[in-house]
Every structure is written in C-alpha cells, then in structure tokens.
Image (tube, rainbow, N blue to C red):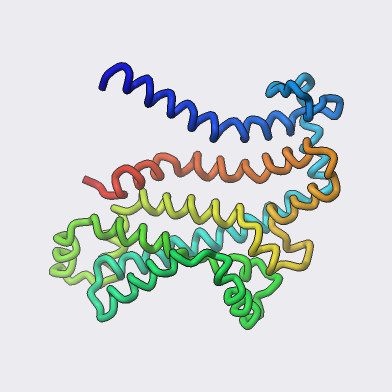
C-alpha cells in the first residue's frame, strides 16, 4: 500500500469517527454543564466550564429512572433469551436438517425482511391484545423475541460448520438435539454474541412499540419514560442530555462484555478452525 493510499484511508476513518463520536461527546458535554453555562452559545465548547452531575440527580428526582430501567432490563432479557433460543434452533434446522419445504421457509424469512416494521405493527397489536398481553412487559417483548435477521445469521453460522462433523455425530447415534448442543453450538458462540447484542440494542432502544402497548406509567420502559423530560424541561436541554446518557450506559456495558465474541462472530463467522 502506498503512502497516499494509507493517508486517504486514515483520513476517511477519521471522518467516519468524527461523524459517529462527535454527537455522543456533545450530549455528554451538555449533560455535565451547569445551569449557568449557555448551551446555545455561538461559540460552543465541548469542555464544560463547571462540570456537575446535578443534572443526573435532577433526572432521578423527577423520573423514576431505576423503575423504568428495570422494566427495560426485563424486556431486553426476554428478547435476548428468545432470540438466543429461537434463532439458534431455527437457524440449525434450516442449515443442517433436511425437511420438505425448507427452501420455502427460507424464502418466507427473506421476504419478511423487505417489510418495514410499521407495516406489521397493527397486526402485532391485534395479536398481543387477543392474547391479553397489552400493558404488560411480556407484550412489549413478544414481537421481538425472535428476529428473522437473527435466524438468517445463525443459519449462516451453522452452514459454515463442516457437514462431516454432523455426519460423524449421526454415525455415533447422536440425535438432532445432541448434535446441536454438543457438536454445532460450541462453534457459533461468536454469532450468538452478535445476535445478543443486536437483540439487546433493539429492545433497549425501542420506543414506538412500547409507547403503543403500555398505558400504565409504572410499566413504562426507560426510553418511553425519559420522554417526560422533553415535556417537563423543554427549555433545559442539559437534563434531556443527561437522560440520554443514562439510557446509553447499559448498551456500552453489554457491548464491553461481549465485544471479543462479537468481533469473532463478525470476522470469522463464529467458526473454529
């Protein structure tokens, strides 16, 4: 690689990094600014003159952040658990098991990716209401407990595992469940972390669906509950920024815990050599 190409690549990476990181840094800076600092200044500053955590304390006083966060944790746990179990079993069935109509099922799964979520939200609500799960955390989590994209990702991971391992396990008398757990599953831990992160972020950041399903303020998730800040403190963006940072912290924690498996799943297809 020539020097010019290397400089160009690093310059593009810095541009992408700036586009990605600067909004986050601006929100963090705003959340730490005191009431005396002007956030609308014509010459904005990223570094607060008098950093303070009072904005975070004020958010906790006005909005029951802990209760809303626990509701979000419950929803995210249900969604992640459902995707780990459902996407794993469905992906394994599509990749390794031979049954009539498997290609038709795969085509149907691919077709669902074309539809935007808003196109099926009415059908989802009618289904949840018929099950008596409206205004419940389970009703919020149910539509996302198995994502079609996660099924396809797991299918790709299982497909990359040599069929010889599957055949050898069959010869030894292992049934489908034993082959999944003992032969195939250890080789897709990287992809499991990928779908876990995607499922967690999707459940944690979801706003529209919980807003439709939930009516009791005690059942609100964190993303919906923090919207009270926009109405109560319209003229104080410091508190809104603080609420945004509070909702962002769990995503960072989950990614930090699973990052090494995440990159293994992305780069290697979750396959051991």
Q: Is residue 85 visible?
A: no
Q: Is residue 143 above or below residue 188?
A: below
Q: Which of 22 and 7 is in front in this view?
A: 7
Residue 167 locus on image (x, y percent): 15, 66
Residue 189 locus on image (x, y percent): 36, 51
Residue at (68, 24) in percent of width and height: 46
Residue ranking furthest to the bottom: 130
**Quadrant of the frame with the N terminus:** top left
Q: Is residue 126 visible?
A: yes
**Quadrant of the frame with the C terminus:** top left
Residue at (49, 42) in percent of width and height: 257
Q: In which quarter of the image is residue 219?
A: bottom right
Q: In this view, does 265 lie above or below 116?
A: above
Residue at (33, 21) in percent of width and height: 6
Q: In this view, does 231 lie above or below 237?
A: below
Q: Which of 203 and 105 is in front in this view?
A: 105
Question: Is 26 situated left or right of 158 in this image?
Answer: right
Question: Is 71 situated left or right of 96 in this image?
Answer: right
Residue 29 locus on image (x, y percent): 70, 29
Residue at (30, 49) in percent of width and height: 269
Q: Nearer the viewer, residue 110 or 172?
A: 110
Q: Quadrant of residue 266?
A: top left
Residue 272 locus on image (x, y percent): 25, 47
Question: Is 211 situated left or right of 122 in this image?
Answer: right
Question: Is 80 situated left or right of 173 in this image?
Answer: right
């Amino acid at each position: 690689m020539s020097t010019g190409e290397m400089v160009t690549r690093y310059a593009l990476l810095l541009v992408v990094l700036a586009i990605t990181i600067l909004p986050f840094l601006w929100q963090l800076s705003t959340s730490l600014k005191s009431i005396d600092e002007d956030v609308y200044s014509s010459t904005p500053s990223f570094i607060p003159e008098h950093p303070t955590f009072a904005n975070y304390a004020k958010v906790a006083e006005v909005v029951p952040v802990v209760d809303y966060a626990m509701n979000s944790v419950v929803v995210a746990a249900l969604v992640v658990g459902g995707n780990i179990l459902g996407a794993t079993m469905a992906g394994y069935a599509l990749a390794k098991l031979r049954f009539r109509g498997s290609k038709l099922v795969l085509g149907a799964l691919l077709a669902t990716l074309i539809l935007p979520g808003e196109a099926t939200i009415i059908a989802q609500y009618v289904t949840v209401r018929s099950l008596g799960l409206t205004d419940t955390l389970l009703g919020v989590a149910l539509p996302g407990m198995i994502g079609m994209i996660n099924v396809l990702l797991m299918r790709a991971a299982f497909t990359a595992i040599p069929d010889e391992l599957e055949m050898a396990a069959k010869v030894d008398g292992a049934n489908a469940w034993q082959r999944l757990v003992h032969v195939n599953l250890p080789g897709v831990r990287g992809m499991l972390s990928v779908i876990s992160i995607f499922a967690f972020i999707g459940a944690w950041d979801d706003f529209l669906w919980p807003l439709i399903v939930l009516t009791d303020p005690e059942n609100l998730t964190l993303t919906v509950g923090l919207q009270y800040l926009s109405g109560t403190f319209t003229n104080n963006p410091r508190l809104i920024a603080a609420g945004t940072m509070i909702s962002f912290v769990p995503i960072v924690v989950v990614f930090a815990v699973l990052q090494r498996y995440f990159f293994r799943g992305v780069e290697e297809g979750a396959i051991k050599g």
